[in-house]
Amino acid sequence: MTDQTVFLGDMRFDNAAPFVLLGGVNVLESRDFALRVAEHYVEVCGRLGIPYVFKASFDKANR
């Protein structure tokens, strides 16, 4: 298997890149809840110096 590099904006994802946390909610139930979760992740990741990308699904079948 060959190594691949993927870019999301200016973030690089590959085996040699620093750790990036992808996290969020399984299903987007409300905008308010998604924003509260994202804000918490941003706060904690900011304190720890960890790059963060919010992720969520519109449909439970997509998880």
Image (cartoon, rainbow, N blue to C red):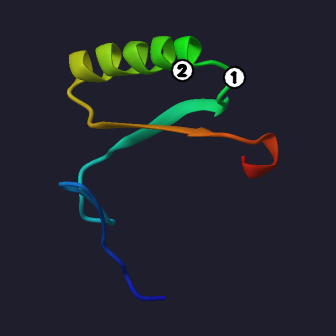
| Residue 48 screen position, x and y as percent | 25, 21
- Residue pointed to by mark 1: 29
17 up-or-down from 27: above or below = below
Pick whichever, 17 or 43, lies toward us. Answer: 43
So how many labels did they put on this image?
2
Q: Badges 1 and 2: C-beta atoms under 8 Å apart?
A: yes
Q: Is residue 40 left or right of residue 30?
A: left
Q: Amino acid at mark 2?
A: Ala
| Residue 2 screen position, x and y as percent | 41, 88
- Residue pointed to by mark 2: 34
Q: Write the residue at 55% across / 19% down.
A: 31
Disc 2, SS: helix
Disc 1, SS: loop
Q: CA distance from mark 1 to mark 2?
A: 8 Å
| Residue 61 screen position, x and y as percent | 81, 48
13 up-or-down from 28: above or below = below
Q: Write the residue at 65% across / 29% down.
A: 28
Circle 2 residues within 10 Å: few <14, some 14–19, many ≥20: some
